[in-house]
Amino acid sequence: MDQNPKLFVYGSLLRPTGIAEVDTAMSRAGRDLGRASLVGKLYDLGDYPGVIPAQATEPAARSTGSAARFSGSAEPRVWGKLIAMENPELLFSILDAYEGFHALAPELSEFVRAEAEALSAQDGTSHITFVYYYNRSVAGFTPIDSGDYAAYRRFPT
């Protein structure tokens, strides 16, 4: 089993962003572990998507901060890709800025970096992973019921 910390990406980071620093960081992020999913609700925010924990009633920065662990298949899932990170500190220094995450003031962040449980689509293996949760109200945004942003936008992953 890969012991490197994991990152789950589900939206704009699945393909080149057009921002050289972000694209270079993602190309060197680590080993692609393939398609995976986690429990959550996915929304179309316009130019990019956002995921919130499935049982969230408030923005992620005001939640408990512990890993979002859910069981059962009845809960909505978000589909993306799992990466075993080679250098998490370097990657997070770039992605935190891209995602608008401020570790010292998470309540002001557009997205917050948190831990969640993801399942490998290949073999069902459970992984604790980092994910960027949307940290604002989703009122007025369109839910993506399939949980699959790549399919929703019709681009290959």
Image: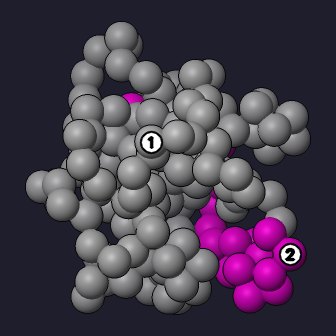
On-image quarter of the C terminus: top right
Residue 131, by quadrant, is bottom left
In the rendered view, does 67 fall on the left or right side of 17?
Answer: left
Which label sits in the foreground, 1 or 2?
A: 1
Residue, disc 1 = 139
Residue type at mark 1?
Answer: Ala
105 up-or-down from 141: above or below: below
Magenta-highlighted residues: 17-39
156 up-or-down from 113: above or below: above
Q: Residue most toward the front? A: 140
Q: Earlier in the sequence, mark 1 or mark 2?
A: 2
**Callout 2: helix, strand or loop?**
loop
Q: Is residue 78 visible?
A: yes
Disc number for residue 18: 2
Q: Residue most toward the top? A: 74
User: How far across and how far down the image is residue 15, in percent?
Assistant: 80, 58
In the rendered view, does 40 fall on the left or right side of 14?
Answer: left
User: How far across and how far down the image is residue 65, in percent?
Assistant: 18, 59
Q: Is residue 128 visible?
A: no
Residue type at mark 2?
Answer: Gly
- Residue at 44%, 66% in the rendered image: 111
Residue 99, by quadrant, is bottom right
